[in-house]
Amino acid sequence: MTSLLTKKILLLFLVYLSYSLFSAMAIAQNYEGLKELKGYKIKIFCSTDAEERATLIAKNVDGAQTFLSSLVGFEPEVTVVILNPADWPKFTKGAFYGMPHYVNQQKVLNIASEDNAFWKSFIPQLDKLPKALAAKITTAYVGKDGKISMQPFFDLLAIHELAHAYHNQGGLKMQRRWMGELFANISLHTYIAERNPKLLPALTAFPQMVIADGKANFKYTSLKDLEDNYNELGSKMPENYGWYQCRLHDAAAKIYDGGGIKLYKKLWTTLKTQQEILNDEQLVDLLAKNTDQSMADILINWDK
């Protein structure tokens, strides 16, 4: 993978910081000029020319909330706003078009309704990739017109952001910053695997591409590095931060494969009941006893 492609791909994972970064820059909730879509548990608004596209997104996000709520017995308050380029700056602040983000202060999830330059900038040069990986990318991200589009991946990020609403509003103690991101990734992977497994290639091909490129060029690689330098990574080192996110995506897939829905429920209960911050040794013990060894292995085997 070329250095430029690596930077572009990893830059997108700054989206996962958005639920905290953008909450301080929110615009007041006012959906005048948008169309409200009826028939969903979640409140959903969209640009007037984006109803068809918004309906597809709404079904997926609404389905994810119904599914996740059935597992944990809690339903967060969330409004989903699906916007065209003209409406985007009217209802968001600080995010460029195409970046899905959850604003915790307003309990709003903003999503782009159209393919855009930001998404297109991540389309790789297939002839520069290993043949097997290029084949995965082609299969996962080909559009109806036969062209590569990153829209399938970005659509799934909305569910990751929705998961942040669950732990923010549900009273969970994440213990570590990386745990908040891992939880969101496990939520996303569990929903897709259980309810829409045909989308798994779109969810997994991207992280595989990044992980395959190695970690030699990154300053920070340990979980302690991530915890100690989280703000620096998020604001100044997007490539390095993105590598962490890809590792956590990969870990989420393996955790689901090993424990499925039962593990997800155990994780929710554990993070909700354990409100005191633990040291690493205590956290390993808690995760191994109360969830699954695969969760504890994140800490034990990360650097191996």
Image: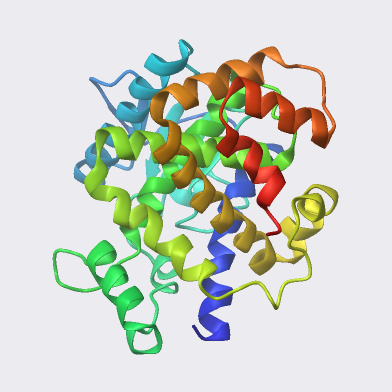
Closer-to-camera residue (193/157): 193
Q: Quadrant of the C terminus?
A: bottom right
**Closest to the observer, 260 or 87:** 260
Task: State the count of labels.
Answer: 0
The quadrant in which residue 172 appears is top right
**Image quadrant assignment for residue 149:** bottom left
**As drawn, is 75 to the left or to the right of 199?**
right
Asked if residue 85 shows in the view, the reply is: no
Residue plotted at (32% across, 27% down): 62
Question: Looking at the picture, how far across and down is residue 94, in whole percent?
Answer: 63, 52
Coloring applied to the structure: rainbow
Measured as percent of width and height from the top left, residue 249 is found at 51, 50
Residue 3 found in image quarter: bottom right
Residue 69 in the figure: left or right of residue 284: left
Position of residue 96 measured from the top left corner of the image (x, y, whole percent): 54, 58
Report if residue 3 is visible in the image: yes
Give how far across and how far down residue 107 sits, in percent.
55, 27
> Which residue: 43% across, 37% down?
258
> Looking at the picture, does residue 148 appear above or below residue 269?
below
Asked if residue 192 is positioned above or below residue 244 in the image, the reply reads above
Left/right of residue 194 with respect to residue 302 in the rendered view = left
Residue at the spot 15% in from the left edge and 72% down from the top edge = 146
Please name whichever residue, 294 or 246, is drawn nearer the observer in this view of the structure: 294
- Residue extending farthest to the bottom is 127
Query: Compared to 115, does 42 lie above or below?
Result: above
Is residue 209 positioned above or below 114 on the image?
below
